[in-house]
Amino acid sequence: MLLEESVVEAGVKEKFKMKTIRFIHRGDLSASMRFLNALKDKDFLKNLDKYGRNGVEALSLATPVDTGKTADSWGYEIHYYQGGASIVWTNSNVNKGENIAILLQYGHGTRNGGYVQGRDYINPALRPIFDEIADSAWKEVTSL
């Protein structure tokens, strides 16, 4: 039994033999390091305020209007965290604890048991802003 186990073990070792990969490097990495350092030093977050304002304007124009209060209640906040940031668009029009912008977006029940269908107006309004952010970031990275 011991002889059979060692033959099997040798066969397994042969079948899964580790291959060696060898890299040969000539020159230096100065061009790569220059690119990475330039990328690190860029201030990609400097335009977030502009995109926040543009988003507020787009949302205000796209919001369904009854009284105009919801359209006039858009704002934004920029949240910074280690390694990045995010833009959060807000709407302060709240009635009986419910955010009216969300009710318009997703729909809601009525007092008499009916239902008002939601209307997707937020996503189409912000899509051009998201595209602009992506294009701007891509240009910034590829210009280095």
Image (spheres, helix red, strand yellow):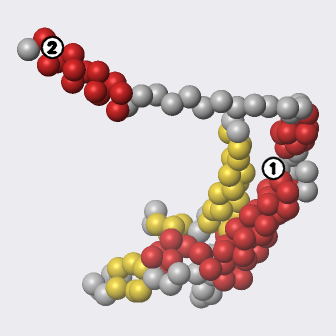
Q: Where is residue 127 in the image (x, y as percent from the top left)?
A: 66, 74
Q: Which of 134 and 18 is in front in this view?
A: 18
Q: What element carries label 1?
A: loop
Element carrying mark 2: helix
Question: On the image, numbered disc 2 is attached to which residue?
Answer: 3
Q: Which residue lies furthest to the left in this view?
A: 1
Please state the horizontal and vertical placement of residue 124, each as a whole percent of the image: 62, 80
Mark 2: few/some/many CA within 10 Å (<14, 14-19, 20+): few
Residue projecting furthest to the top? 2
Q: Mark 1 points at which residue?
A: 45
Q: Say if 64 sits above or below 87 in the image.
A: below
Pointer 1 and pointer 2: residues touching (CB < 8 Å)?
A: no
- Residue 113 in percent (x, y) is at 27, 84
For image coordinates 50% across by 84% down, the residue present is: 119
Instruction: In the rendered structure, find residue 79 and report the number of the disc placed on it.
Output: none
Residue 133 vertical position relative to residue 141 in the rendered view, above or below: below
Q: In this view, does 121 lie to the left or right of 60?
A: left
Q: In which quarter of the image is the N terminus?
A: top left
1 or 2: tag closer to the N-terminus? 2
Count of marks overlaid on the render: 2
Mark 1 residue crowding within 10 angstroms, few (<14) / some (14–19) / many (20+):
few
At label 2, which amino acid type do we have? Answer: Leu
Name the residue type under label 1: Leu
Left/right of residue 14 with respect to residue 33 in the rendered view: left
Q: Residue at x 46, y 28 (%)?
A: 18
Q: Distance between the residues labelled 1 and 2?
A: 67 Å
Q: Is residue 115 visible?
A: yes
Q: Which residue is drawn at 71% across and 44% down?
A: 84
Q: Looking at this view, is 114 or 140 the one in front?
A: 140
Q: Can residue 67 be seen in this view?
A: no
Q: In the picture shown, does residue 82 fall above or below 110?
A: above
Mark nearest the camera among 1 and 2 is 2
